[in-house]
Image (cartoon, rainbow, N blue to C red):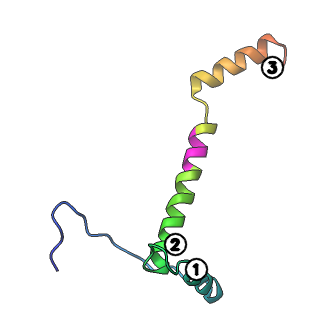
Amino acid sequence: MAEKKGKKKSKYTTVSIPTPLYKKIKKRIEETGFTSVSDYVTYVLREVLASLEEEEKEEAFTEEEEEKVKERLRALGYLD
């Protein structure tokens, strides 16, 4: 099978989910743009991971920002 120019062939693995969950997802995706439960689950997982990664970026201080906060806390007497 020939690959389309400029596209990488994706590799896949199998993940097991409970049958009742599979049936719920299958029912939910009826009449949507998703062609399979796998497509929908992949989409949802990508969205969740992207959201978590964004939260991690927002919560993290740079070393410089952290040092400024520590300096302010020292000036206020909260840190030695």
Disc 3: which residue: 79
| Secondary structure predominantly adopted by residues drawn in magenta | helix
Residue type beneath disc 1: Ile
Q: Earlier in the sequence, mark 1 or mark 3?
A: 1
Front residue of this view, candidates 77 and 46: 46
Residue at mark 2 to residue at mark 3: CA–CA distance: 47 Å
Q: Residue furthest top?
A: 75
Residue type beneath disc 2: Val
Which mark is in front, 2 or 3? 2
Disc 1: which residue: 25
Residue 3: x, y in percent?
18, 71
Q: Which residues are magenta?
A: 53-57
Q: Residues within 10 Å of mark 2 (few under 14, many from 20)?
A: some
Above-or-below relation of 1 to 55 = below
Residue 61: x, y in percent?
61, 31
Q: Give left or right: position of 16 versus 72.
A: left
